[in-house]
Amino acid sequence: MLKIIRGDILFAPDKNRYELWEDSYVLVKKGIVLSVVKELPLSCWNQPVEDFRNCLIIPGFVDLHLHASQWPNMGIGYDFQLLEWLKKYTFPLESTFSDMETARKHYESFIHELSASMTTRACILATRHLPATRLLVSMLRESGLGAFVGKVNMDRNADPPLLENTEDSIEETRLLAQEMQEFEQFHPDTLVHPILSPRFVPSTTPELMTALGKMAQEYDLPIQSHLDENLDEIAWVRQLHPGDLDFAHVYERFHLLKPDKTIMAHCIHMTEDEIRLIKDRRIFIAHCPSSNCNLASGIMPLRKYLDNDMLIGIGSDIGGGNTLDMRAHVQLAMQMSRLYYSANRSFKPVSVREAFYLATKGGGRFFGKVGSFEKGYEFDALVIDDGYKKGLPDKPSLETRLEKLINTDNPVLIIKKYVRGKEIQRSSLK
Amino acid sequence: MLKIIRGDILFAPDKNRYELWEDSYVLVKKGIVLSVVKELPLSCWNQPVEDFRNCLIIPGFVDLHLHASQWPNMGIGYDFQLLEWLKKYTFPLESTFSDMETARKHYESFIHELSASMTTRACILATRHLPATRLLVSMLRESGLGAFVGKVNMDRNADPPLLENTEDSIEETRLLAQEMQEFEQFHPDTLVHPILSPRFVPSTTPELMTALGKMAQEYDLPIQSHLDENLDEIAWVRQLHPGDLDFAHVYERFHLLKPDKTIMAHCIHMTEDEIRLIKDRRIFIAHCPSSNCNLASGIMPLRKYLDNDMLIGIGSDIGGGNTLDMRAHVQLAMQMSRLYYSANRSFKPVSVREAFYLATKGGGRFFGKVGSFEKGYEFDALVIDDGYKKGLPDKPSLETRLEKLINTDNPVLIIKKYVRGKEIQRSSLK
């Protein structure tokens, strides 16, 4: 069945170019974009049209890094930096996810908000708890959103309620992957996939990392973790692994930098060696500007990585980040790049177009053909009334409307939200 | 008539201290705070109480710097820096305020949003146009908000539609001040006051600055302008005034640094000489973090100024800043101080308490006894339902609620908004 959607269509097929289609149509079949056209072809004349004239139609945002379990802590404790913050706020909260009622309450609230938001796909860390992670997976399946979800691994440098036994950690991770892959066999259309999620180098023994590296091969699993977020964290990794060249090369040694299939969050303080390695391995960088401000981690040199043609997306990093609204993260990515420029004039600020690209197709590439309306892409889309639905005469250009959408908190209404062509049910609009 | 208001009361009498009054009462007479008490005194037992149990009651926010006329441009053009941005976006927009219908449309929209926001007082620049500025003044009087409002002066380095004749600029400025002061004689309760507003050094001839310096004395007028926002701007000032020590000393020479009565916006790149001068003259610094990010101006060393006991408030700087929501600016002030710290470890990040103080009493001091609930202060207040109105059992501490209010975009409802004891009418809630 053909789906025809009419409106003011904008997407960024690459970082240097918008496609701008005022009052046009996107044709979708089985969730996949066939084409975007200015005039409907004759063959479509008798087909129903979903008419969103004067509404903005853009690809849904991809949130490349977030901790669903930290949702209740969002906005709290930013007077501390990473390692202290983890100890004082994150770990105590994550411990409570051993209780299924607590997990259900928090995950329900989280998915409610994620559904209402402009995010269509997300890469999510849960906690170390298998039952609670299973619950999150099943709730995400129901939501219709697209996601990679990982049970966190941590078998050292944690306090007992969160500390795992190495064997259990490996076994539970394997079990979840097997279950989810079996589910995929019976539901090939599922949008929720497993991802290996070692917390970060200091939380995982060499034995555990070895096993996860092997598992990634054996089960063809993607991987997500953290890299070079904070200077104390980096010093700690150096202390734990004095034989390795740097933080990134620890992951490399354990085969945890799987080409095209790995996300490393933050990557603020990478050495030139690390930059080379991350680029060579085609690792996705999840840039998390809000979290990096909140925890005083520093400014990632986004322009440098962008001009180096590295794979980059944007992450909210809830709870280090303080909103699920990806527009705020796109905005802050630009603001931080401007501050970086103000101190290092050789790195030009990142433009609205570049930042928008990163938050749609940039991160979307991790999911396959996602984040654009080019032919063959999965139709993840937002239909937004940004105040011109009634067709005011002074409607600005499509580019300016996107700029306003991202740069201000002007009230807008999400009229529809699609993931692979299916509408997402939202109990509240945001 | 005594006003008694009940709720969870929080305010910061100084930067190092909160007053936390859970389920307490604030007693207000003729718009002035008498006291905050845990138990009502006997004499009040038969008085009506405005009962906002479980709601947060905090001082209204003070926006120490904004351009009302730039409201329609908010969020646009941030790919440029200050001088280019002024030329491409700001000046063309401000030119249109010669037309009163245009001015009315934009100012109506602006005041509608300001009324709905958490701001109770603001220091506002209009445009160079006397009629449109008069209109803004009368609309602000009607709104019930507190404000200083200035007609902008610019008699050089502008294009003709905005460029003023020096004499006209002086005369129109004097006229507006006289009119507003006359109005004050008949309406001593008015909350809207005049303020001299030379745009910045490059826009004003020595002749104009001389006249404004004299006018400030003669009519006892406060002053607002811009200082050390952008490196190109600073170089330009140096070029225009090679005989002066620096940017700030140009203002000083023309008697435009009036002790306790002057606001200088931005103050990012001050030299040690300038810091000394600004401190000695007791000049208010309007810290505008959002604008400073958006226009790549740089990070103001907030911690340095704060520890140096300078007078500081926070400004949205619409349209360089991209929201009227002062919470976002408080949040960004902290985020930028954390980034500053991440590069200069000797300057500790600014805490939630310090930033909240700056956005309430810090800027409020420019208005007199404003921004606190201490005895004798004008009762500017926000009553906020932050989700606990029904009294959930897991209500967090008052401090944590404030932290969440400022650090997240969790939905909250402004139940009431008072300025000097009078409720502000808002046609929409935010």
Image (tube, coloured by chain):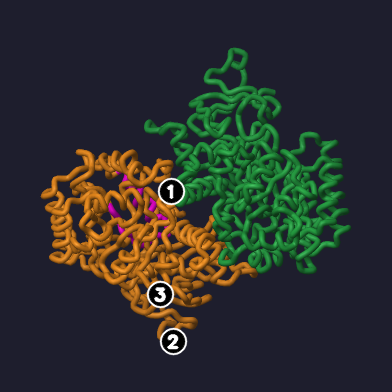
Chain colours: A orange, B green
**Label 1 vs 3, first from the N-terminus:** 1
Q: CA distance from mark 1 to mark 3?
A: 34 Å
Percent x, y of residue B317: 63, 53
Chain name for mark 1: A
Q: Report the amino acid beneath label 3.
A: Phe
Specify the quadrant of the image occupied by residue B229.
bottom right
- Quadrant of the frame with the N terminus of chain B: top right
Q: Does the magenta portion include A114?
A: yes
Q: Are marks 1 and 3 on the same chain?
A: yes
Answer few, some or many: residues within 10 Å of disc 1's Cα (few below 14, many 20 plus, some between 14 and 19).
many
Specify the quadrant of the image occupied by residue A80.
top left
Residue position for label 2? A42
| Closer to the eye: label 2 or 1 | 1
Residue A294: numbered disc:
1
Percent x, y of residue A381: 41, 67
The residue sitting at 38% across, 45% down in the picture is A81
**Closest to the observer, B422 or B247:** B247
Percent x, y of residue A38: 49, 81
Q: Is residue A351 visible?
A: no
Q: CA distance from mark 2 to mark 1?
A: 54 Å
The residue sitting at 53% across, 18% down in the picture is B39
Using residue B258 as the reference point, say whether residue A7 is left or right of it: left
Using residue B291 as the reference point, say whether residue B390 is left or right of it: left
Residue position for label 3? A373
Percent x, y of residue A345: 52, 65
The magenta segment: A105-125
The residue sitting at 43% across, 79% down in the picture is A36
Specify the quadrant of the image occupied by residue A398.
bottom right
Q: Report the amino acid beneath label 1.
A: Asn
